[in-house]
Image (cartoon, grey):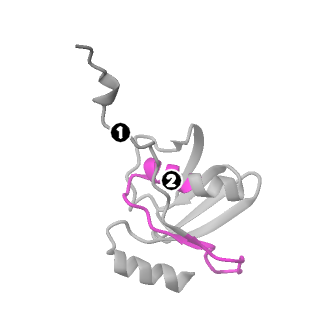
């Protein structure tokens, strides 16, 4: 008897990365955030990868991030984070920068200011916050 092992393998779905939970405003308004982001964890390197998947095609490759480091898990040193096979510089400002904001920069298209919903926020609360900002 010949056994066809191809029939024994379970069907596999192609890997699909999760999309960033992000709402961007339709236009830039002076003094107002450009959007709001709800990361799933406090792991900056992981979350920036998902965010860059959305941001890079829209605004150009993410090159710098400025943030308050207290809410984030950053690796040792942490001045550079590898995001989707390229380096992103991380500027840490513990004083003067709101811990619920993150500033993103691209060499090709400028900078953006995003509000950050804390990762442990309930889905209903996050939805209300994101709708209010949008």
The residue positioned 45% from the left and 67% from the top of the image is: 38
- Outermost residue toward the top in this view: 1
Can you identify the residue that label 2 sits on? 50
Crowd rating for badge 2 (residues with CA inside 10 Å; few <14, some 14–19, many 20+): some
Q: Quadrant of residue 105?
A: bottom right
Q: Where are the magenta residues, as a range? A: 23-52
**Nearest the eye: 16 or 31:** 16
Q: CA distance from mark 2 to mark 1?
A: 26 Å
**What residue did someone put label 1 on?**
11
| Apparent side of residue 40 relative to residue 54 in the rendered image (left or right) | left
Q: Quarter holding the C terminus?
A: bottom right
Question: Dot 1: few (<14), some (14–19), or many (≥20) neighbours within 10 Å?
Answer: few
Residue at the far right in the pictured view: 108
* For residue 86, side relative to residue 132 (left or right): right
Tell me the quarter of the image containing the N terminus.
Answer: top left
Q: Earlier in the sequence, mark 2 or mark 1?
A: 1
Q: Percent x, y for residue 26?
A: 68, 77
Locate residue 112 relative to residue 122 in the image: left or right.
right
């Amino acid at each position: 008897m010949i056994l066809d092992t191809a029939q024994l393998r379970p069907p596999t779905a192609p890997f699909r990365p999760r999309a960033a939970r992000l709402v961007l405003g339709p236009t830039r308004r002076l003094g107002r955030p450009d959007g709001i982001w709800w990361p799933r964890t406090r792991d900056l390197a992981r979350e920036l990868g998902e965010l860059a998947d959305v941001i890079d095609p829209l605004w150009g490759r993410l090159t710098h991030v400025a943030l308050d480091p207290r809410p984030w898990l950053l690796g040792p040193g942490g001045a550079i984070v590898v995001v989707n096979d390229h380096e992103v510089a991380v500027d840490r400002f513990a004083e003067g920068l709101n811990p619920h904001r993150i500033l993103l920069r691209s060499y090709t298209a400028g900078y953006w200011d995003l509000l950050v919903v804390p990762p442990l926020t309930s889905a209903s609360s996050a939805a209300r916050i994101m709708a209010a900002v949008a």
